[in-house]
Amino acid sequence: MTDIEIARSTKLEKIVEVAKKVGIEEEDLEQYGKYKAKISEKVYENLKEKKNGKLILVTAVNPTPLGEGKTTISIAVADGLRTIGKNSILALREPSLGPVFGIKGGATGGGKVQIAPMEDINLHFTGDIHAITTANNLLASLIDNHIYFGNELGFERIVWKRCVDLNDRQLREVETGLSGEKKIVPRHDKFVITVASEIMAIVCLATDINDLKERLGNILIGYNKQGEPIYAKQLNAQGAMTVLLKDAIKPNLVQTLEHTPAIIHGGPFANIAHGCNSIMATKLALKLGDYVITEAGFGADLGAEKFLDIKCRKAGIKPDAVVLVATIKAIKYHGGVEKDKIQEENIEGIERGIDNIYRHIDNLKNKFGLNVIVALNRYVQDTEKEIEYIKEKLAEKGVELSLVEGWAKGGEGAKDIAEKLVNLTEKEEDFHYMYELEDSIQTKIEKIATKIYGAKGVDYSEAALQEIKKIEELGYGNFPVCIAKTQYSFSDDAKNLECKGDYNITIRDIQLKTGAGFVVALAGKIMTMPGLPKIPSAENIDIDENGEIVGIF
């Protein structure tokens, strides 16, 4: 059976019943049909003084192009904890339409461990990402309208970009304002994918609607001839943008196929943004559940680093344990095994590629000071010999491995890791960040590059150095840093899978995000507008004669 067939064969509970499991009453829900709902902000306010549950972060090794199943493992762990009698709850990101119609597919898990209704979540869901797209583009239109009617603020350089929640490489570089109307000023511009929009980051980092409005007003949108910054609040844009986002800021409640409550909210990518769900969703989950399972995108060098250095710092939280997801195919992939041979038993390839796991463990355990367990997401082609080899190698490093078979067995296939996590979350940690906010921007970048990526050093373009200088002169040098980098490698070269020998990280551009409150450093050839593959998933997505969606995975 396909994922969508498995999901449809499962009888879901009405969302009001799911909510009751974590103490949310029907009056505190805004229902979107029978199986989806927004959660009222009153719920968190009423629980503010309640002790937090345990926070479990799920991250991963550097992935293959099809991903390694972080969301699948996250759901399996939550269901596994419920299976052993624990009050668990999920706090995950919303899927972007880019991957859904691209190569990776949706982000609702797989097999017997899915969040549902999967078609709704993978497509329009409750409209959050559409609202973010509209708010982003409203600001863009207000900027150009202001310039059309005289440019009172004196825009000389515009840094705000339009966005769309699709992979569309044609929009990476565009010419706008070509209608020929007398007052319109043509401009070379570009689009970003919505999940890379600063408004997505703002929604995920805001603590309430008032904080959201203030952050929206603080967005840097351009500079005048004197090089002075111009902000969205100077256009009085924040009120209308907040109105568009008044529902999008509320976390969404759904369920797993085993009826575990799941809060799904926000969806920044980890390779080009900060890669975590919203602070509001995570903090609410910590009040509702005894064990909260959340996720950081892509490999731990990206998602986990940003979760810890940006989100945890801003939210005042930290994980009590970290699950590092690995697959045997990813280990072989990073050991140089060719794609067409990756399903064959290959101990030598695993021996070469297992260093990728070691490096992530070292970062999480010894540099961030966190408790770590490795979850091996089992695939049907994995052999006992390969599994035992990895288990023995990790035992030599003092790290437990749990074989997770959630895809095939649901929560029952994750009981082992659930029990181990209960014990692991009780152990003390010595958590610390990779840099201090008082460090210079270059120092922050270099600490991440050398400590987490294992780079020898950092090279900067002249444009990046000039931008850093300007940012520090404007007084924003104490912002955390969000590095946009390929997810496939510790380096900034997607093809350098094994990362042997010395390499530098190249920072080609710097972007200031005054609303989100961080600085983005673009490394290597990373782009903020992805493209579709030769055969996109969109070609296989359809609606049949019975009105049912097919082809989503």
Image: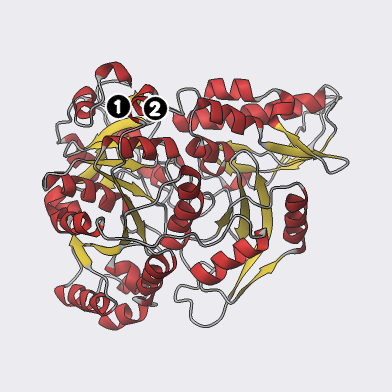
Q: Is residue 263 left or right of residue 243?
A: left
Please report the residue visible at 27 percent of the width from the left and 75 percent of the height from the top.
398
* Residue 36 disc label: 1
Q: Is residue 132 left or right of residue 338?
A: right
Amino acid bearing label 2: Thr
* Residue 427 disc label: none
The answer to whether residue 269 of the structure is visible from this angle is no
Quarter of image, res 16: top left
The x, y position of residue 194, in whole percent, is 53, 39
Please report the residue visible at 75 percent of the width from the left and 29 percent of the height from the top.
144
Quarter of image, res 442: bottom right
* Residue 126 disc label: 2
Q: Is disc 1 placed on a helix, strand or loop?
A: loop
Amino acid bearing label 1: Lys
Residue 317, compared with residue 139, is above or below; it is: below
Residue 404, compared with residue 528, is above or below; it is: below
The x, y position of residue 339, in whole percent, is 36, 70
Distance from disc 1 to disc 2, alpha carbons, whole Å, reads: 8 Å
- Whichever of callouts 1 and 2 sits on the residue coming sooner in the sequence is 1
